Image: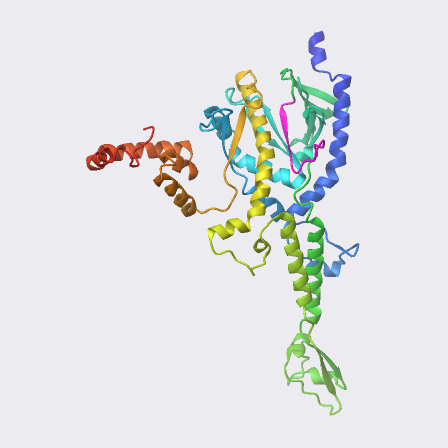
């Protein structure tokens, strides 16, 4: 009875951790909501420090440069395989199974996206009630999480996730090195719903931090460099639309006219827009005069907007053609790759940091799956090339390497990015071709077996 009571009641240290981390979540709420609005293109415009007047609200226009800052590098981050240290030629089958069972092809993209929007995100690992053999890997919403990292050991020492269920009850999960506690808040404060004393010795979660600085574990949004410029572009576009409404067409100034001059043959008043756009002005008063004001030139707006977009592209390491600047258009694959060199370099740097984080996630997965920790830093990650490459370009390079004997058939398949299922299918097809075509088999024998014979069939 005494043990049951202690496990269902929060200790003073646990209560202190919940209060401390809850305060962090509340403090981060507004800054993270602001970043989310910029990513979605739903930020409220500010015009010279004041809100846009209601009568001009319909002219608000936002070019979602922050969305481009997140999307472009994210779509180039594609994890290909995990392997154990010392054998980079062989993908680890257990880790591939973990990746596929947890749908991490799509969830990893979500992880990288949230990381770049908010500067950080988290992946948790835990027991799977529906499948004991495959622990559950889950990407968390960073807006719901408070955490503390020990800067000396670079380890997370506590993490709290707060959320509301379908009944609007506030619930949470407190992750500590040896315990995971599920809690809910009622009239009398926090209550323990479940407690798992797993004795891992580490928090069962991994931090993904974007653009992390030395000794800091908060991360920085990938959009931060262009948020101010985005507001400036939006103001320019809004002003340009207002100017287009009032000054893009010639204006007329008429003196000596009467109201009757703006009626049709039936004596009905001519609509304002019709009288404004009419090319011929027929006035009954001989002394009446019509002047025309020159239409406004909006080129100053378009030039300023193009320059600001070019600066955004430069800040993000993107080719200027991504920002609508079409003056230079690469004509060949090599030129495209050179044009994207800075973007590719940025993604490579992101992959180095995120690769370590995914390796730690898989280390936790193996601990839950086998009950034992893998050897320290023994899991490695292989990423696909983030550069823009066509299938024809990859195949051409692979065939040339194959012709000089520098690459095997399966090496060609690896360059093409085929998975194990596709490779297995091709082995079976090549084996069937060899059996069904004696002439080809004989020619392969005469050539010393240098032809594309099936490998590992």
Q: Residue furthest top?
A: 1
Name the quadrant containing residue 438.
Answer: top left
Give the percent coordinates (x, y) of residue 170.
Answer: 70, 29
The magenta stretch spans residue 216: yes
- Looking at the picture, does residue 11 appear above or below residue 55? above
In which quadrant will I find the C terminus?
top left
From the viewer's perspective, is residue 309 above or below residue 127?
below
User: Up-down: is 198 above or below 279?
Assistant: above
Q: Is residue 46 magenta?
A: no
Which range is magenta? 203-218
Percent position of residue 61, x then y: 67, 57
Which residue is painted at 71% across and 70% down in the image?
246
The answer to whether 168 is drawn above or below residue 374 in the figure is below
Instruction: In the displayed orientation, state which residue is furthest to the bottom.
Output: 286
Image quadrant where residue 400 sits:
top left
- Rendered location of residue 452, percent (x, y): 30, 36
Q: Is residue 181 left or right of residue 133?
A: right
Would you say the magenta stretch is mainly helix, strand or loop?
loop
């Amino acid at each position: 009875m005494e043990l049951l009571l202690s496990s269902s009641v929060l200790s003073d240290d646990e209560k202190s951790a919940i209060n401390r981390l809850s305060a962090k979540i509340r403090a981060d709420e507004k800054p993270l909501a602001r970043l989310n609005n910029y990513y979605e293109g739903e930020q409220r415009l500010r015009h010279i420090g004041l809100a846009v007047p209601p009568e001009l609200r319909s002219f608000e226009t936002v070019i979602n440069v922050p969305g481009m800052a997140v999307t472009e590098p994210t779509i180039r981050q594609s994890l290909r395989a995990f392997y154990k240290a010392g054998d980079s030629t062989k993908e680890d089958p257990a880790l591939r199974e973990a990746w596929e069972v947890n749908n991490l092809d799509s969830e990893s993209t979500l992880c990288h996206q949230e990381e770049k929007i908010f500067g950080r995100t988290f992946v948790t690992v835990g027991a799977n009630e529906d499948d004991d053999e495959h622990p559950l890997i889950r990407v968390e919403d960073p807006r719901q999480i408070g955490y503390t990292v020990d800067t000396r050991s670079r380890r997370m020492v506590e993490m709290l996730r707060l959320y509301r269920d379908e009944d609007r009850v506030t619930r949470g999960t407190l992750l500590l090195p040896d315990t995971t506690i599920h809690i809910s808040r009622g009239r009398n404060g926090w209550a323990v719903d479940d407690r798992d004393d797993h004795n891992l010795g580490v928090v069962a979660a991994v931090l993904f931090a974007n653009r992390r600085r030395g000794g800091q574990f908060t991360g920085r949004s990938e959009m931060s460099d262009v948020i101010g410029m985005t507001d400036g572009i939006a103001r320019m576009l809004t002003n340009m639309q207002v100017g287009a409404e009032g000054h893009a067409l010639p204006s007329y100034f008429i003196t000596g006219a009467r109201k009757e001059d703006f009626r049709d043959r039936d004596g009905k008043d001519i609509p304002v827009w019709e009288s404004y756009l009419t090319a011929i002005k027929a006035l009954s008063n001989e002394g009446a005069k019509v002047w025309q004001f020159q239409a406004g030139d909006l080129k100053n707006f378009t030039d300023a907007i193009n320059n600001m977009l070019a600066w955004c592209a430069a800040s993000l390491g993107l080719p200027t053609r991504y920002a609508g600047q079409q003056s230079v258009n690469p004509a060949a694959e090599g030129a495209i790759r050179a044009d994207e060199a800075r973007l590719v370099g940025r993604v490579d740097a992101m992959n180095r940091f995120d690769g370590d984080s995914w390796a730690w996630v898989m280390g936790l997965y193996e601990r839950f799956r086998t009950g034992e920790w893998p050897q320290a830093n023994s899991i490695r990650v292989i990423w696909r090339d983030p550069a823009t490459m066509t299938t024809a370009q990859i195949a051409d390079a692979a065939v040339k390497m194959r012709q000089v004997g520098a690459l095997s058939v399966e090496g060609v398949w690896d360059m093409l990015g085929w998975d194990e299922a596709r490779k297995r299918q091709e082995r079976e097809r090549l084996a069937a071709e060899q059996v069904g075509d004696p002439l080809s088999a004989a020619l392969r024998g005469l050539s010393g077996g240098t032809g594309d014979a099936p490998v590992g069939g």
